[in-house]
Amino acid sequence: MKFISVPESQQSLSDPTFLDQIISAHNINFWILCFFGGLCILSYLQFSWDKYCAIRQRWRISESTLLLTAILGGALGAKIGQKAFRHKTTKEPFRTSLQRIFFWNFALYAIALRPQGKVAVTSIALAFFNGMQ
């Protein structure tokens, strides 16, 4: 069995040339949508699990964790989960906070998908990966 050798400079995610190749080879919008989509799915699943635990009187997910996932970009999934499971729909100030976060998330999506936003997202990703070393 033969293994394909990868040049040493391309083996690390923190290598800027490696990230540049990924970004230029694939549309950055795809990666942005994957990030936000993943957070939306995570947020939806958190609401599902929290409702399940609430019914069975088990240990639950804290409201701050639910809101944090929404703030980071998963507000759409949180709102869908809130409606689908009829969970935390009347609890204040959670309901109002989630509604505000939902509108701010759409502004975040719009900024991230604009050309200037792509540059900002790319520089943040590079700084993050360089900080991991």
Image: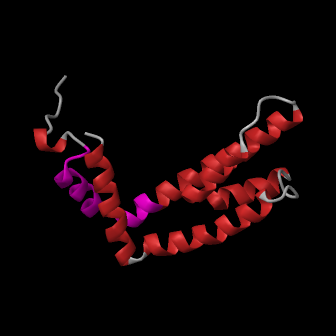
Q: Decide: is 60 above or below 107.
A: above
Asked if residue 4 shows in the view, the reply is yes
Dividing the picture into quarters, in which one does residue 55 lie?
Answer: top right
Residue 82 locus on image (x, y percent)? 78, 55
Q: Residue furthest top?
A: 1
Nearer the observer, 126 or 11: 126
Give the main secondary structure of the magenta stretch. helix
Q: Is residue 31 magenta?
A: yes
Residue 5, position as x, y percentages in the image: 13, 34
Residue 74 in the image: x percent, y percent? Answer: 60, 56
Left or right of 51, for residue 18: left
Q: Residue at x 19, y 48 (%)?
A: 15
Tally of numbered tags? 0
| Stretch in magenta | 13-32
Q: Residue at x 17, y 54 (%)?
A: 17
User: Where is the C terminus found, in terms of image quarters?
Assistant: top left
Specify whether 102 is left or right of 72. Answer: right
Q: Is residue 18 above or below residue 57?
A: below
93 or 104, which lies in front? 93
